[in-house]
Image (tube, rainbow, N blue to C red):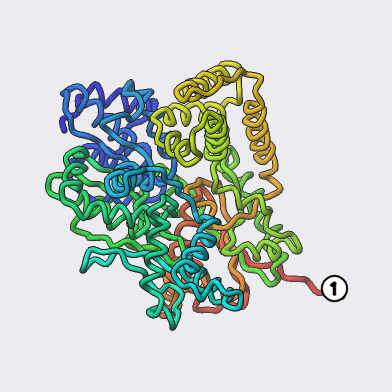
């Protein structure tokens, strides 16, 4: 792909203002072959990827190429970020023949829906975490196929088997290319009832009642036919998988089989060392196929040198001019000392370091489990509102509006499943995402309210439903969610304890990591600094301490119990860590 210098400078100006892409970012943008891009913390991965896609789409458009671009993101927030860049660059949103969306959206649209149309002659799908009515269906199925189970004295047996059907997993038998049932519950009588259990489970799926895991199962079945694979490979020449470490193994394997060909350019972008979902394996990395985007703009060498000890393979590089504060080991005797001492450290550095003092980023206490919150602040439980933190405001607003539209469409004799399927696959959802981003940034102004009303009415009119005006209660609900968000932001100074999992992807001014109970993070730290030889720890814990430290721009504090502070530990850590020892009490005569 030949990038015109004018286009490159335009996109660079839009994204970076007076700044410039660094050498690694520029190399990634120009990279035109299948690679795994390992992007370190603060390396500008999202910015560089958005620039790359904008320039690629501009190039394809100007050359009238029919080659498609497929961008698979981990969240809809990333979809919005990329589309915003494309709009600013004059490219517009990603539209046909290109695609942008989550991995489930991709496979549902291009594999699952076509499969149901082709195989079962319908596409009335309801995809959810689970369906409450499944159990009743299996009860009815068992009663019909085993008449003896219809007798009242066998209700317990029937219910137990129905639960086994519900909990057992449908799988693809790759040797025979057939659907099979896995004994997920390890039931000793599984083989006796397996044939009918499989029949019940599969017949329910054929009706269109699917779970999110079924997306990959039915996509795998659909793609058994080479002609279907060929269609997708020919349509999408360029494929980008964002945050590949967070993609499920089933999804990753399916994408690899589909687009891992000589004729496709398939680039996986992310950071495998930030795989922190329990029970999800670290993705396999072929070093021969890796490109490292590893120059960070987030912190200086004071942080990077320790990250490279904790995770040597990350090989994080920094700018010489970028400065952080040497990380701190906060030694403590009693847990209640930790939090006030951390606040005291922050105040001291605010006086000593002007850039730290002027930073608008947050300071957070990071815990491994929610239960540790009441140890850090005695008797104060982990705030329940953080449970919805991972669900973005954009997602909440989008769900609210989609549900509103679906309910009005159903009133004009549209089935619920068909209405949901239609709206969730509508191309105008991209426009809805853009409007909602503006709501989050600016509030529900009169102009934005008119834009939202216009879009909702276009969708309603398309299905013959009655239009709405700006006095409709849906706008009051949108406004309430926006104001609740503002109120939550105002509470941030008093509620500053978060799990490490919840801050992944964030940038903080400082972070305090505490480590209680069996002290798994302390053990990893001591191993990485060669204090001990114990490598018997979970890779997720190893990655969590890497994630925690890599969030900060300036200051990282690790709380360590004084009992751990042996002469050997001191010898290994005191060179490059600032050691904060507890104040010695002076005896009073």
Q: Is residue 272 above or below residue 450?
A: below
| Residue 284 image offset from top left, x and y in percent | 28, 62
Q: Nearer the viewer, residue 541 or 107?
A: 107
Q: Nearer the viewer, residue 550 or 458?
A: 458
Say whether residue 502 is left or right of residue 84: right
Q: Is residue 374 above or below residue 502?
A: below
Q: Residue at x 36, y 69 (%)?
A: 181
Query: Residue 25 is drawn in which quadrant?
Result: top left
Work out which quarter of the rendered image holds the C terminus and state it.
Answer: bottom right
Q: Is residue 210 above or below residue 191?
A: above
User: Which residue position holds label 1?
Assistant: 588
**Residue 123 shows in this picture:** yes
**Residue 44 shows in this picture:** no
> Which residue in the rendered view is the most extreme toward the right?
589
Q: Secondary structure at mark 1?
A: loop
> Which residue in the rendered view is the most extreme toward the bottom?
188
């Amino acid at each position: 792909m030949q990038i015109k210098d004018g286009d490159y400078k335009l996109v660079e100006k839009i994204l970076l203002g007076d700044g410039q892409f660094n050498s690694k970012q520029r190399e990634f943008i120009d990279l035109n072959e299948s690679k795994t891009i390992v992007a370190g913390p603060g390396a500008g991965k999202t910015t560089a990827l958005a620039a790359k896609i904008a320039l690629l789409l501009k190039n394809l458009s100007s050359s009238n190429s029919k080659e498609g671009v497929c961008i698979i993101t981990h969240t809809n927030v990333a979809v919005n970020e990329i589309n915003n860049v494309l709009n600013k660059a004059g490219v517009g949103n990603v539209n046909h023949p290109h695609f942008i969306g989550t991995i489930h959206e991709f496979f549902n649209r291009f594999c699952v829906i076509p499969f149901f149309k082709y195989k079962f002659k319908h596409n009335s799908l309801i995809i959810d975490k689970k369906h409450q009515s499944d159990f009743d269906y299996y009860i009815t199925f068992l009663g019909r196929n085993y008449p003896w189970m219809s007798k009242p004295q066998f209700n317990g047996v029937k219910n137990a088997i129905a639960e086994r059907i519900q909990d057992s997993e449908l799988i693809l038998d790759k040797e025979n290319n057939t659907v099979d049932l896995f004994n997920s519950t390890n039931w000793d009588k599984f083989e006796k009832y397996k044939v009918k259990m499989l029949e019940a489970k599969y017949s329910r799926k054929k009706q269109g009642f699917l779970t999110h895991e079924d997306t990959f199962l039915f996509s795998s079945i659909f793609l058994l036919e080479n002609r279907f694979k060929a269609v997708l490979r020919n349509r999408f020449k360029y494929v980008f998988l964002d945050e590949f470490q967070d993609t499920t193994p089933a999804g990753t394997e399916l994408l690899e089989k589909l687009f891992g060909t000589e004729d496709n350019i398939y680039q996986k972008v992310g950071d495998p060392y930030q795989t922190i979902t329990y029970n999800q394996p670290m993705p396999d990395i072929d070093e021969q196929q890796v490109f490292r985007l590893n120059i960070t703009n987030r912190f200086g060498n004071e942080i990077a040198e320790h990250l490279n000890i904790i995770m040597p393979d990350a090989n994080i590089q920094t700018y010489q001019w970028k400065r952080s504060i040497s990380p701190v080991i906060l030694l403590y005797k009693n847990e209640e000392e930790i939090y006030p001492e951390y606040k005291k450290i922050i105040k001291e550095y605010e006086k000593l370091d002007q850039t730290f003092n002027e930073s608008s980023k947050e300071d957070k206490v990071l815990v491994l489990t929610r239960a540790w919150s009441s140890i850090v602040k005695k008797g104060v439980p982990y705030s329940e509102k953080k449970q919805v933190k991972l669900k973005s405001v954009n997602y909440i607003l989008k769900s609210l509006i989609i549900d509103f539209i679906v309910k009005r469409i159903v009133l004009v004799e549209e089935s619920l499943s068909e209405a949901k399927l239609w709206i969730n696959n509508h191309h105008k959802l991209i426009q809805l995402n853009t409007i909602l981003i503006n709501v989050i940034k600016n509030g529900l102004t009169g102009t934005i309210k008119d834009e939202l009303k216009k879009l909702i009415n276009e969708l309603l009119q398309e299905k013959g439903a009655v239009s709405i005006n700006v006095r409709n209660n849906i706008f009051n609900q949108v406004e309430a969610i926006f104001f609740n968000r503002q109120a939550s932001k105002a509470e941030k100074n008093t509620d500053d304890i978060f799990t490490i999992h919840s801050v992944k992807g964030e940038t903080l001014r400082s972070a305090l990591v505490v480590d209680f109970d069996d002290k798994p993070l302390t053990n990893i730290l001591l191993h990485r600094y060669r204090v001990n030889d114990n490598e018997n720890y979970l890779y997720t814990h190893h990655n969590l301490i890497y994630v925690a430290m890599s969030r900060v721009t300036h200051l990282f504090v690790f709380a360590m119990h004084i009992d751990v502070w042996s002469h050997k530990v001191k010898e290994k850590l005191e060179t490059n860590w600032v050691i904060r020892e507890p104040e010695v009490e002076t005896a009073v005569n």
